[in-house]
Amino acid sequence: MSGWKSMPLKRWVRINPDVLPEDYDPAAEIEYVDIGSVDQVRGIEAAVKMYFSDAPSRARRLVRDGDTIVSTVRTYLKAVAPIRRPPPNLVVSTGFAVLRPKSDADPGFLGWLAQSEEFVQNIVAHSVGVSYPAINPPSLGALRVRFPSIGAQRAIAEFLDRESARIDELIAKKERLIELLEERRLSTIDSAVDGRILGLPQNPVNNRWYPDLPSDWHVIRVKYMCSRIVDGVHHTPEYVDEGVPFVTVKNLTEGDSICFDDLKYITPEDQIEFSRRTHVEKGDVLITKDGTLGVPRVVETDRVFNIFVSVALLKPIRKKIDSYFLRFALESKRVAEQFAAKRLGSGLQHLHLEEIGDVQIPLPPRDVQVRAVRCLRDALSKVAELRAAVRVQTDRLLEYRTALISAAVTGQIDVRTYRQEPEAVLEESV
């Protein structure tokens, strides 16, 4: 490519030019950015304000407008972000390399180059270590990169600023649509829990959470429709490579059912001991009580497994309540409001077993519960199909954005003559 030069990165940038000294004023306030707060697409998502005396020892790298930060530890996270108009006290972790462009490198082009898949993969390929891969500044500076003339760099940066903003706006619309579909899903669940999904007439009820219900429905606390409510093992067991699955919050929150991928395992001997407390059976209901709160799932397998303390086990009295009706009632917005009311002012991200047991839900006749669940499943399947389609479109827009960045910063397209697709065509194409 005419006018493009391939040279080591250090030829174009200064690496980590400013570092806070050890005797920096401990009373000074900084805004600190760690690797977990940076995304390859969204950039810096959060900065934490703190006094320097309270900051971790890795809070040392000063940045300024025009810099680009690139993660040099856990490089697979792809934590890359251009720095634009930062506060004067912005400090990033030593897990980042701060790239400051020299006079013949445009800050905008550098930012886009660092976000390109080729650049990130080059860093990953030259990282050392398996569980904690990292690259040191000299190795980073030695990586060869291609830069065009300063005028071409600016033209590419302006093109990508404009085009990425257009694509990001489309992605934001898709993400908003997903939020609306989630609201629709929860509203549909509520309509099943209070009988509206069956078209049953509503009558006033003297209850704070359920002001209207069908005439033969009653509001009951969860503890009166379960034979047992107990949480899982209260200590971290010894994990083994093969054994009995041990389910945590993560396994309940990564899908619409209990996920048995990426499991931890305990020994059969531990399982015998733990099952005295938590004997999980098909038809039981599990609900998360720590971290991501109040996510219920029905046990749909005869597979033997056990649960950690962050998960509670509910054993429904089958003659009184259908397991799936209980699951969806616990997932409803009105139960979420009850949980929130109990935590109001406490700031705790934790549910007590007593709080779960004291939650109020409607209890219709059991045959009506089954009918409501059947109607609800049909309605939710349609919502799920729409959400899946929107997620596919979002993923394709992200892929298009990634491909466009790579093509522009490597000179595969001429940004001066590149035909920009109208928004309607671009949205339809994905």
Image (tube, rainbow, N blue to C red):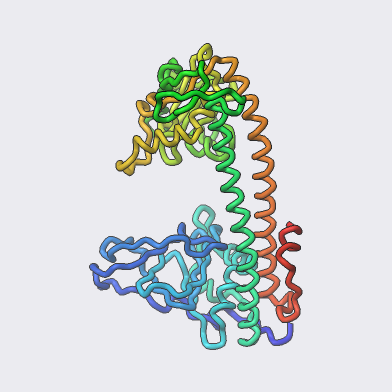
Q: Quadrant of residue 380?
A: top right
Q: Is residue 29 above or below residue 177?
A: below
**Image side of residue 427 versus residue 116, left or right:** right
Q: Position of residue 288 (x, y in %)?
A: 45, 34
Q: Position of residue 404 (x, y in %)?
A: 69, 68
Residue shown at 45%/75% (left/top)? Answer: 85
Front residue of this view, candidates 240 and 50: 50
Work out which quarter of the rendered image holds the C terminus and state it: bottom right
**Residue sitting at x 47%, y 61%:** 45
Could you tell me which residue is drawn at 53 percent across and 58 percent down? Answer: 77
Q: Could you say which is closer to the camera, residue 242 or residue 407?
A: 407
Q: Nearer the viewer, residue 294 or 41?
A: 294
- Give the number of marks: 0
Which of the 4 image quadrants contains residue 154?
Answer: bottom right
Q: Is residue 260 visible?
A: no
Estimate the x, y position of residue 158 in percent, counting from the top left: 62, 78
Q: Is residue 109 above or below residue 273?
A: below
Residue 36: x, y in percent? 46, 57
Question: Which residue is depicted at the point 37% across and 25% down?
Answer: 358
Residue 294: image quadrant is top left
**Is 92 rendered above or below residue 249?**
below
